[in-house]
Image: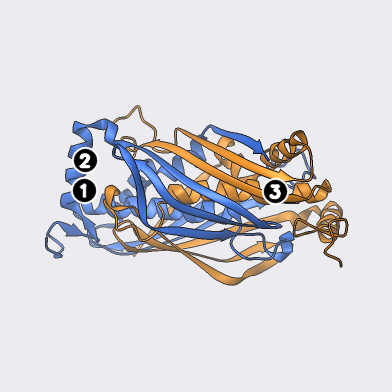
Chain colours: A blue, B orange
Amino acid sequence: MTTTVNGPMRNGVDTTTLFATLDAVKAAPEAAKFQFRASNEWISGTHSRGEIHDFFGVGEDRTHTRTFTFDADHPAVMVGQDNGPTPVEYVLHALAACLTAGLANIAAARGIRLTEVRSAVTGDIDLNGILGLNSEVRNGFQGIAVRFTVSGDASPEQLRALVEQSRARSAVYDVLVNRVPVTVDVTTA
Amino acid sequence: MTTTVNGPMRNGVDTTTLFATLDAVKAAPEAAKFQFRASNEWISGTHSRGEIHDFFGVGEDRTHTRTFTFDADHPAVMVGQDNGPTPVEYVLHALAACLTAGLANIAAARGIRLTEVRSAVTGDIDLNGILGLNSEVRNGFQGIAVRFTVSGDASPEQLRALVEQSRARSAVYDVLVNRVPVTVDVTTA
């Protein structure tokens, strides 16, 4: 394994493993069936703590190398204690991270060396919806805007095409623009 | 301000402020127009770092009491270094946190004391989609399931009704099940 730009490592992506993984999944498509999981415990008011640790993939239950723990809350202006970001801010973070990871992989696969990728995401929301004060206002974001700044050893057109391909293959973008079925069950004790 | 169950604090929710906020927004609906923001910087491979700090609400730009920073990555089995959860796991975390915050607020408004709220969220995804190996497989989750355990001083029916009302007023649930417009712009440098 080398770390030169023209070797198997590119943009921090192990392209040998990336292409080998693609070949492996082509040969055994079931390996690509994953289940991701998060758990959450209410602490007080709008403050809760989430944990992300285990998942299923490539045929078996697996764990991350450590347990990731994240607090969520509302800021004071939303009657919370600001112990963490709001849940909707985590969604914006997820979208930026997903598009960025895809972009780096796609650039590596196309032999483009990236030098900088930054993004800023904004989401407009009218809280008259979740407050139940206006039935014509939706609960969630009315729109989300992502602004990328990308630098690398390629033409502006090639760099823009990386973002476009990442958008076309983004899991988080997909669930936001195309909807996903969600079931909610309750056990009382 | 007291902290007894029958006083203005209930479930850690300052119900006096909650109801005062509702009245204030009824009188000035523009106050409820918020914009949330996240920024992201690519580090290497699928590893990126997101920051959540400022937002707009109640007529002006505001900041959280501190800057929240979160790494995202893919695990080794997805050709990453596992420096953080995957972006899609942040979405599951956001959904649980949103439903939980709403549940605590709604319980407080209804005079129900909660003793425990836990949830587990799972999302099934077939990576043949994002890998571009099967055009019939979507990129994102095929389905998400949330399982709540709720305990408190109320009947099982009342506790289940809290979850149902939270679902009906959840910003994250809304964007997942009803879609949201997302624009992606690129600046190259």
In the rendered view, would you say A5 is above or below B150?
below
Any part of residue A25 in sight? yes
Pick the front one: A189 or A84:
A189
Q: In the picture, which quadrant includes the N terminus of chain B? A: bottom right
* Residue for badge 3: B102
Question: Which subunit holds the residue at mark 1?
Answer: A
- At label 3, which amino acid type do we have? Gly
* Residue for badge 1: A18
Pick the front one: B50 or B105:
B105
Q: Are marks 2 and 1 in contact (CB under 8 Å)?
A: yes
Question: Which subunit holds the residue at mark 2?
Answer: A
Q: Characterize the local packing of mark 1: few (<14), some (14-19) or many (20 or more) Cα atoms within 10 angstroms.
A: some
Question: Which subunit holds the residue at mark 3?
Answer: B
- At label 1, which amino acid type do we have? Leu
Any part of residue A142 in sight? no
Tag 1 secondary structure: helix
- At label 2, which amino acid type do we have? Leu
Q: Report, in whole angstroms, how far the alpha carbon at label 2 lies from the one at label 1.
A: 6 Å
Q: What residue do we see at 40% from left, 37% from top?
A: B125
In the rendered view, would you say A63 is above or below B156?
below
Q: Are marks 3 and 1 on the same chain?
A: no
Q: Are marks 3 and 1 in contact (CB under 8 Å)?
A: no
For residue B80, which quarter of the picture?
bottom left
Count of all numbered marks drawn on residues in the image: 3
Q: Characterize the local packing of mark 2: few (<14), some (14-19) or many (20 or more) Cα atoms within 10 angstroms.
A: some
Q: Characterize the local packing of mark 3: few (<14), some (14-19) or many (20 or more) Cα atoms within 10 angstroms.
A: many
Tag 2 secondary structure: helix
Q: Position of residue A68 (x, y in %)?
A: 45, 58
* Residue for badge 2: A22
